[in-house]
Image (spheres, grey):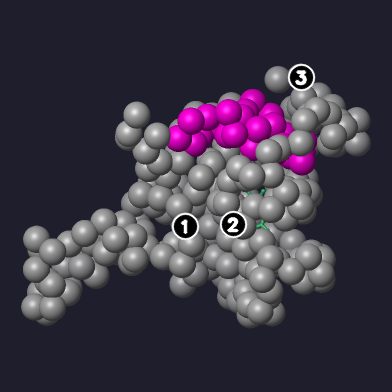
Amino acid sequence: MMDQFFSRKEKSSESYPHLPDQDNIPSHIAIIMDGNGRWAKSRGLPRSSGHREGMKTITEVVEKSGEIGVDYLTLYAFSTENWKRPKTEVEFLMKLPERFLHKELPRLQKNNVQVKTIGDPSVLPAHTRRAVEKAVEETAGNTGLILNFALNYGGRQELVEVVRQLGQEVQNGVLEPDDITEDMLSGRLLTRDIPDPDLLIRTSGEIRLSNFMLWQLAYSEFWFTDVLWPDFTGSDLMEAVQRYQQRKRRYGGV
Ligand code: FPP
């Protein structure tokens, strides 16, 4: 827990000693970026400062992920439950995609990053939706890292939507209930175009999923750290990847 007492500048981003095994890089990393509020509180700052600092971490983690050859990076930026937060905090959080993309889009382009999103955009403020749509459109032709923002995303809501679709198909007589398969569910999820995460990271010491990618994380490796998201560095990401590389994935086999 000492990390939170040092600022980014005091923390070496290369403190983790070994390079990961290039033959076993997780193709898809999903991250629950937690601890922005506590980071700010421990410094006597408003929660918004923690979120602002957390954005800088995103930049570092995106770059590092691209460098080591991760194909997909999904970041839980706003959950369907986050609307319960005070109005001023929600408004601030809704400005972050614009701020981030306004500042970082040129660099994302330069690094060949493709921006995608999962979640229900219909209730996002128009300014948030526009900023994200612009980034998605302008990076659509990029072929490098896929940076997938989960924005107003909820795993249960996603599954309910799939169940509704399948129910409709049954009702329309185009599908028999007995013919429903796992692939049919996977193929109707918001993540239908991307593989399931290999590695899930959650920062800040909380050990729970908080409604994140409930179906997709069935066989993922989990890695939890006490480091708060604003303190998380490329070096922490390397540690997570190396821990992942020490795991033996059996998918229920032996
Ligand atoms: C969790 O910390 C963090 C969030 C709910 C928001 C995460 C968002 C960002 C890091 C920036 C998003 C940026 C873009 C570009 C979409 P918390 O507030 O729950 O912290 P706490 O648990 O310590 O209170």
In the picture of the structure, the residue carrying the numbered disc 1 is 195
Name the residue rendered at 68%, 74% in the picture. Answer: 142
Is residue 206 covered in magenta? Answer: no
Q: Left of 63 or right of it: where is 27?
A: left
Image quarter of the N terminus: top right
Label 2: element kind = strand
Which is more toward the observer, 28 or 78? 28
Name the residue rendered at 77%, 25% in the picture. Answer: 3
Residue 2's disc number: 3
- Does the image show residue 193? yes
Q: Left of 239 or right of it: where is 211?
A: left
Q: Is residue 95 above or below residue 10?
A: below
Q: Residue furthest top?
A: 2
Give the class, few, some or many, for how many residues have Cα within 10 Å of label 2's Cα (few <14, many ≥20).
many
In the picture of the structure, the residue carrying the numbered disc 2 is 72
Q: Which residues are magenta?
A: 221-249
Distance between mark 3 and mark 2 Cα atoms? 30 Å
Label 3 or label 2, whichever lies nearer to me, is 2
Mark 1: C-beta under 8 Å from nearest atom of ligand 1: no
Q: Is residue 135 above or below residue 31?
A: below
Whether label 2 touches label 1, CB < 8 Å: yes
Q: Is residue 187 above or below residue 40?
A: below
Residue type marked 3: Met
Whether label 1 touches label 3, CB < 8 Å: no
Label 1: element kind = loop
Distance between mark 1 and mark 3 Cα atoms? 35 Å
Q: Earlier in the sequence, mark 2 or mark 1?
A: 2
